[in-house]
Amino acid sequence: MANLNMTSILEKMTGKDKDYRYMATSDLLSELNKEGFIPDADLEIKLSNIVLQQLDDAAGDVSGLAVKCLAPLVKKVREPHVLEMTKKLCDKLLNGKDQHRDIASIALKTIVSEVPNSSVAQSVLVSISPQLKKGITGPGMSTEIKCECLDILCDVLHKYGNLMASDHELLLGALLPQLSSNQASVRKKTVSCIASLASSLSDDLLAKATVEVVQLLKNKGTKPEMTRTNIQMIGALSRSVGYRFGPHLGDTVPVLINYCMSASENDEELREYSFQALESFLLRCPRDISSYCDNILHLSLEYLSYDPNFTDNMEEDTDDESHEEEEDDESANEYTDDEDISWKVRRAAAKCLAALIVSRPEMLSKLYEEACPKLIDRFKEREENVKMDVFNTFIELPRQTGNVTKGQIDINELSPRWLLKQEVSKVVKSINRQLREKSIKTKVGAFSVLKELVIVLPDCLADHIGSLIPGIEKALCDKSATSNLKIEALIFTRLVLASHSPSVFHPYIKALSSPVLSAVGERYYKVTAEALRVCGELVRVVRPNLEGYGFDFKPYVHPIYNAIMTRLTNQDQDQEVKETAITCMGLVVSTFGDNLRAELPSCLPVLVDRMGNEITRLTAVKAFSVIAASPLQIDLSCVLEHVIAELTAFLRKANRALRQATLGTLNSLIVAYGNKIGSAAYEVIIVELSTLISDSDLHMTALTLELCCTLMADRRSSPNVGLTVRNKVLPQALTLVKSSLLQGQALSALQNFFAALVYSANTSFDALLESLLSTAKPSPQSGGVAKQALFSIAQCVAILCLAAGDQKCSSTVNMLTDILKADSSTNSAKQHLALLCLGEIGRRRDLSSHAHIENIVIESFQSPFEEIKSAASYALGNIAVGNLSKYLPFILDQIDNQQKKQYLLLHSLKEVIVRQSVDKAEFQDSSLEKILNLLFNHCESEEEGVRNVVAECLGKLALIEPAKLVPALKERTTNQAAFTRAMVVIAVKYSIVERPGKIDEIIFPEISSFLMLIKDHDRHVRRAAVLALSTAAHNKPNLIKGLLPELLPLLYDQTIIKQELIRTVDLGPFKHTVDDGLELRKAAFECVDTLLDSCLDQVYPSSFIIPYLKSGLDDHYDVKMPCHLILSKLADKCPSAVLAVLDSLVDPLQKTINFRPKQDAVKQEVDRNEDMIRSALRAIASLNRISGADCSFKFKNLMSEIAKSHSLWEKYCSIRNE
């Protein structure tokens, strides 16, 4: 049937009527596109011939359709016919009539792009290559033919360059001479053609091509247009091959810089192309270009203001606005020249400078000194496109400063942040002038600059608000302002309001509020939404607190309210506007509620109504939370019941965010309006809450338990509330306490829950205690309770006892000591829990009234069970915290006398010291001396466990008494015993905590003597130093910033496999290799990973990636994992450095993803290998996100290999979508 149909189509295609031919060709196209259409051998020939025939059709639209038919046809016919068509088309292209040449060229391009597989492609290439080469180099070929052939060859090389390796040399030989052609179009096409070829060339051929082009550049007598082409060629090569161009920079960069300086005055394009090539080098060859960076910086700065036809005398600095407006008009009329293209040079220089800023974080301070003033000065650029590039280049400075100094507040005299702060007033002055310009685009650019400033230095504009207000007003009120400009101005206003203190704005509220409020009424939804967000900030600024001293906010209350109310009640508008209006109204009611009493009855019901709508309900719930938390005690009587009922229903919904917001809002409402909500409503809420408690969502559980406590704590709630909690929520809470996942906020909420239950009238303490203790009993189904759960139960018991009062507390302690006095070998879980409970109670209150409790606890040190021993040492330490003067001497005395129990007693001491360091408490001098002597005596102990505990004790003690400990530790860094040196460094690691403390200024000058042990001859000491460096980089990067230039080479050295640390152990039947350096290498790479987060400006990625990271990617499983993480981070943060060496990183990654464990491997090995492959794919996915990664031929092959393997591709896709 299909073939009959075909016959009639083919007949019509040869008809005389052009419309018939058109319709028939269109029918053919739809037939060919059908999945099931498979032609027989006879039909294939007919189809091939007729489509080629139609290409020459006199009617353009018919031949156009025929080209479209080629795309599906190439996939449906066999190879010989494809080759036949290719041959005929090539013939047409080279020897046919002029009018058929275009269509033949398009047809050939279509065939090249649609070839179904690489074997057909190979044959097509064999037939097409010589023809194209002939078209390019053959004698007597016209320019048009050359251009068409170059165009097609460019496509062919782009897609199949790697299949033509054998022809590369011939092609290069044919193409290079064309760079000297007299025809500009031929030269231009040749440049793109060689660039396409370059990405698949071998290094030798690439070098040959580069050398030839550079040679042409060095020839003195070349015509300027040839020189321009050659410079373009250099830039195109660099963009095409990326870092592989690095070795040739030594030849090319000086030549380019020289051309820039010496080009004749009217040869602007030459300079433009030179800058474009330099920009490409900066981004793609960061390692090799570093020695030329200073020269490029000076060159870019010089040409940033290059404007030979224009003298800068009319831009005098005047701040008189009217005068300036006139002047603008004059300057606009005074000088225009269509011939003048010097702006292209300025634009290229700006982009080159931007590349320098982005790719060289280490030059930031220098850039601030040299480039920043020049950039600010060039804001006055007269060509608008260039001005936008100057703005964008300037924006890269603060943005890079933000990236490099994330999380640091060090405003020392040389830090980039400090240098940026110095420039703020100049920037503002210059930008204000730009905000008075007529051009919309300029103003949008100016606001982007200001926005970036506020993001990086949040409070930097405090002194300049007054001068910026007119610019904001003009942007919002001007008739000619576009919505884009308004949005930029509003975003900036919102950022400024949010990041500065409210009092700064009070003099200008009047000027600010009216344009913002009129923007709320705009028709375009994005402007409205942004204006509403600004209103939210404005509300906070107008009345920052209830006293409202010194500023009268009342005149602004109603205008703001009315503007928002109009938007709130309007139904037919965008969701974003609805949500921002609801949020904003929540803020208005909570801030101005006392001045809006008359309006509340009409406004609150609208918000309640929005709670009923699925799209806006989450936002409305959050708005009510804001209103409920207001210190003004807003009168909600008109809607309260309805709101509570809605919220209770929301607790059943599947949407997690909604449930979470609902819990918070209910909590705020009950705290503020409990007296107006009946107990009946409480009971309904509690029933809903009981279903939300589980260890699968601890955050939700914590919020739920907090709400339960609020409900029980409300003095007005009836006894039924406590009863409902006991029946519904308590069983869930007792299940939760057994979970090994319980921690943090959820655990403290659970403790408060038990305390609140004791306080609420009708729950007996004894019953609660009994049920808590019984949760620890091992059940026949689930076996014993997890160790973590026992700690949770013990903490809840302690809180429960404290809440119940002294008498109950004492009786509980007696009961627990009785359990311990009973036969200790029987029930270990019961004993374990009793010890933990005693510790938790003892930490919170003094147990010295119970005689000999310390001896009872220390008896358990004899227990045969390990966990009982450790629980006993935990209990003893915590009991000592409750009464230091009594129990600390006891512990110290025992450590001296009881050799066997030393490890456990040291753990008890550690508990004491850690608690004291957290609570910032002090020790008496006498006991401190005693503790120190004792600890230093044990620092050479043979047992690693003892040494670690001693180190932690010393580290935490250093937080309490830094003046004594830091010198004592420093003195031991030169000790003969390696154990002591290692222990001292680990102690320092424990003393570097995130919170600031008095130790900071004492350890700052001394830290290098500890960290420099990274070059110790003992590997344990080196590893300790690496771990300490890692902790410092994470918690207090400023401590180590100055030492990094010296430390980094030493750290990198620890990542290398050291043969002397690898030993072979003879196990009789087989030999086993042990690598003692593995832990050290793993720690060193993890340390680099941390440094990338906190000290990026100090780490020179290029020198680390090769050779260190490369060798790590090929190392042991434990080392590869952190290396993959580092590679992903570098791909995000320093893409240019990674691109520069991408090829050499592909092999180790490829090896990792193709590794298969042995047939007899155990499950653990198989799982580890799976994790390893996923980790490598995660790094590959990060590399694939870098723009320009496709320049790397090896990486492209790796990606196609992953795409071909079903299992790898599935994993890769799931990782990419994480």
Image (cartoon, rainbow, N blue to C red):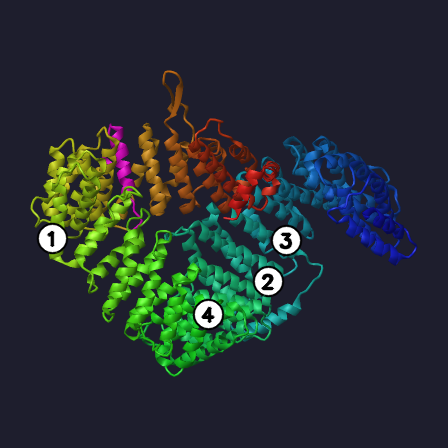
| Residue name at image x 27 percent, y 40 percent | 988
Looking at marks 3 and 1 on the same chain, the residue that comes earlier in the sequence is marked by 3
Gap between marks 3 and 1, in whole Å?
Answer: 86 Å
Gap between marks 4 and 1, in whole Å?
Answer: 59 Å
Front-most of residues 747 and 90: 747
Looking at marks 2 and 3 on the same chain, the residue that comes earlier in the sequence is marked by 2
In this view, the mark in front (2 or 3): 3
Q: Which residue is mark 4?
A: 534
Identified by mark 4, the residue type is: Val
Where are the magenta residues, as a range?
970-995
Left or right for 507, reference 837? right
Left or right for 287, reference 26? left
Q: Which residue is mark 3?
A: 345
Task: Measuring from the top left, give residue 354's x and y in whole percent.
Answer: 55, 51
Gap between marks 1 and 2, in whole Å?
Answer: 89 Å
Q: Which residue is mark 2?
A: 312
Task: Measuring from the top left, give residue 1209's x and y in whole percent.
Answer: 57, 41
Identified by mark 2, the residue type is: Asp
Gap between marks 2 and 3, in whole Å?
Answer: 17 Å
| Residue 810: image tag | 1
Residue projecting furthest to the top: 1068
Identified by mark 3, the residue type is: Val
Q: Is residue 703 visible?
A: no
Q: Is residue 984 magenta?
A: yes
